[in-house]
Amino acid sequence: MRKFEKISFEQFKKDVADDKKLYDSFSLPKRSTRFSAGYDFFSLFDFTLKPNEIIKIPTGVKIKMNDDEMLMLVVRSSQGFKYNVRMCNQIGIFESDYYNNESNEGHAWLKLQNHGDKDYIVKKGDAICQGIFTKFLTVDDEEEILDYRKGGIGSTDKR
């Protein structure tokens, strides 16, 4: 099953704000058209990203998917093309075992940097990135590996 869910309100309070009205009001990612490959993620709050500034942004979203799938989190074309705004890691990869991990419930975050020369202004509810689901392949002669991750971002190399 492939779907988006809100993180729990308890996790939202830790990561974003103790604001039930905000929690209840934000939208889960969705496609803009029937032919859109990416699901737009929306900003939970207003912010201005000044030139050369970096901001870490919570989405309030966790992603459930099949074991042989991943979600690539990427900037929207207009962000890079019009404003020279990029994700710090260029492409965020979320695997199925990130969902409900013990560190942060699988809360998807992104980190943007303004490489342009003008302020990048975002209003609450604006699309700030897009997620694209895809299947992945593995080699047939893979050595034994861990069945699941223990934590959140950067945890797959922890044994």
Image: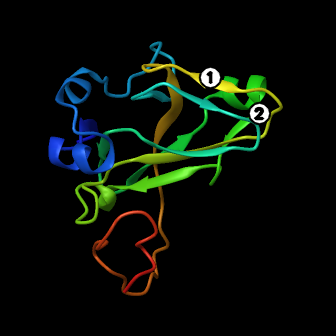
The residue that disc 1 covers is: 121
Classify 141 as above or below 109.
Answer: below
Label disc, if present, on residue 85 of the rendered structure: none
Q: Position of residue 143 (x, y in %)?
A: 42, 87
Query: Mark 2: few, some, or many residues within 10 Å (few <14, many ≥20)?
Result: some
Quadrant position of the N terminus in the picture: top left
Residue at the far top: name it: 33
Q: Element type at marker 1?
A: strand
- Which of the two labelled residues, at mark 2 and mark 1, occupies the earlier sequence position? 2
Q: Element type at marker 2?
A: loop
Q: Position of residue 71 (x, y in %)?
A: 44, 46
Q: Position of residue 126 (x, y in %)?
A: 49, 20
Q: Position of residue 33 (x, y in %)?
A: 47, 12
Q: What amino acid type is highlighted by mark number 1?
A: Ile
The residue that disc 2 covers is: 84
Is residue 26 visible in the rendered structure shown here? yes
* Picture residue at 47% right of the left edge, 15% below the top: 32
Query: Mark 1: few, some, or many residues within 10 Å (few <14, many ≥20)?
Result: few
CA–CA distance in space, label 2 to label 1: 13 Å
Foreground: 28 or 147?
28
